[in-house]
Image (tube, grey):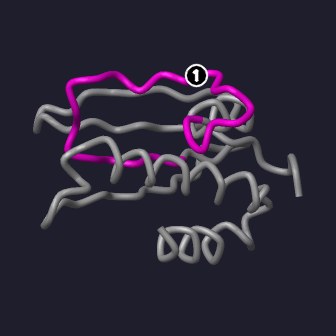
Amino acid sequence: MTIARQCAAAVLESEGVPVDDCVLIISELVTNAVRHTASGHPNGTVILMISDAGPMVRVEVIDAGAPTVPMPRQPSEDADSGRGLFLVDRLSVMWGVRKLYTGGRAVWAMIERGKGD
């Protein structure tokens, strides 16, 4: 996850994007991909894409897929995990999931430029 955060911060710093928000969203999406899909198994892969979308930036994490559909939840205050998609939902303009013909999926989020930092 550290590599994804560092690469994303380097790309986003000069683009007028709220770097802290974007990096947190990317970190949560990559963590979920590794933790909840076959991408976290030996030889698993995760692909991070960052795209210019005019007044927004699109981040997309492609993973090996899982039988469950990612959904935000409201964990209890003392829970150690479970806040990832809740944070993605709060920090992004919109987000979603799309199935890929390869059997994997892409979880994406749109972040507004000039908001945040």
* Among the 4 quarters of the image, the one containing residue 20: bottom right
Q: How many marks?
A: 1
Q: State the image coordinates of residue 38 (x, y, percent, origin top left).
A: 19, 47
Q: State the image coordinates of residue 52 (x, y, percent, origin top left).
A: 58, 52
Q: Is residue 97 above or below residue 105?
A: above
Bin the neighbour count of mark 1 within 10 Å (Cα to Cα): few under 14, some 14-19, many 20 and up: few
Residue under the image location 89 percent in, 58 percent down? 117
Q: Is residue 88 above or below residue 19?
A: above
Residue under the image location 45 percent in, 53 percent down? 31
Q: In the displayed structure, does residue 100 sit left or right of residue 75?
A: left
* Among the 4 quarters of the image, the one containing residue 45: bottom left
Between 67 and 53, the one nearer to me in the picture: 67
Residue under the image location 68 percent in, 26 percent down? 76
Q: In the displayed structure, does residue 47 sit left or right of residue 112?
A: left
Q: In the displayed structure, does residue 12 sit left or right of residue 3?
A: right
Magenta extent = 59-82
Residue under the image location 74 percent in, 32 percent down? 77
Queried whether the magenta region covers residue 78, the answer comes back as yes
Q: Tag 1, which secondary structure?
A: loop
Magenta part, dominant SS: loop
Q: In the displayed structure, does residue 4 sit left or right of residue 43?
A: right
Residue at the outermost front position: 78
The amino acid type, in three-letter code, at marker 1 is Arg
Q: State the image coordinates of residue 109 (x, y, percent, origin top left).
A: 56, 38
Queried whether the magenta region covers residue 16, the answer comes back as no
Between 56 and 82, the one nearer to me in the picture: 82
Between 64 and 84, the one nearer to me in the picture: 84
Between 69 and 15, the one nearer to me in the picture: 69
Q: Is residue 59 above or below residue 42?
A: above
Residue position marked by numbered label 1 in the rendering: 73
